[in-house]
Image: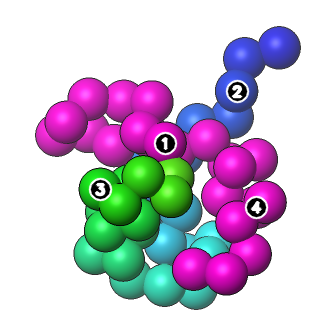
């Protein structure tokens, strides 16, 4: 089954943080970007597993 990928806006809403914070977490390697450099896509399951943002 394919991974449920979400954009930064949706990830930020789901995690209760800003889009900037989501991009910072991707840059820090705490979340994996499955999209492109300009179009970040995050695995929803990984986001859900990352409780402390």
Q: Which residue is mark 3?
A: 27
Q: CA distance from mark 2 to mark 1?
A: 12 Å
Whether residue 49 is visible to the viewer of this picture, yes or no, is: yes
* Nearest-to-viewer mark from 1 and 4: 1
Task: Answer with the quarter of the image where residue 27 lies.
Answer: bottom left
Give the SS element for disc 4: helix
Residue interval drawn in magenta: 32-53
Q: CA distance from mark 4 to mark 3?
A: 18 Å
Q: Position of residue 25 (x, y in %)?
A: 41, 65
Q: Which residue is mark 4?
A: 48
Report the front residue among 13 and 45.
45
Question: Residue placed farthest to the left in the image?
Answer: 38
Q: Position of residue 39 (x, y in %)?
A: 26, 39
Q: CA distance from mark 1 to mark 4?
A: 13 Å
- State yes or no: discs 4 and 3 in contact (Cβ < 8 Å): no
Which mark is first along the chain, 3 or 4?
3
Marker disc for residue 3: 2
Residue 8 painted magenta = no
Give the SS element for disc 3: helix
Figure label count: 4
Q: Vertically, is 2 above or below 13?
A: above
Q: CA distance from mark 3 to mark 1?
A: 9 Å
Which mark is first along the chain, 4 or 2?
2
Marker disc for residue 32: 1
Q: Which residue appears at 31% of the width and 68% of the height?
A: 24
Which mark is first along the chain, 4 or 1?
1
How many neighbours does mark 3 have within 10 angstroms: few (below 14), some (14-19), or many (20 or more)?
few
Give the SS element for disc 1: loop
How many neighbours does mark 4 have within 10 angstroms: few (below 14), some (14-19), or many (20 or more)?
few
- State yes or no: discs 3 and 1 in contact (Cβ < 8 Å): no
């Amino acid at each position: 089954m394919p991974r449920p990928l979400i954009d930064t806006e949706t990830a930020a809403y789901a995690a209760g943080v800003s889009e900037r914070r989501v991009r910072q977490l991707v840059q820090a390697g705490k979340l994996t970007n499955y999209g492109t450099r300009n179009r970040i896509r995050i695995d929803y399951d990984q986001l859900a597993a990352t409780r402390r943002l």
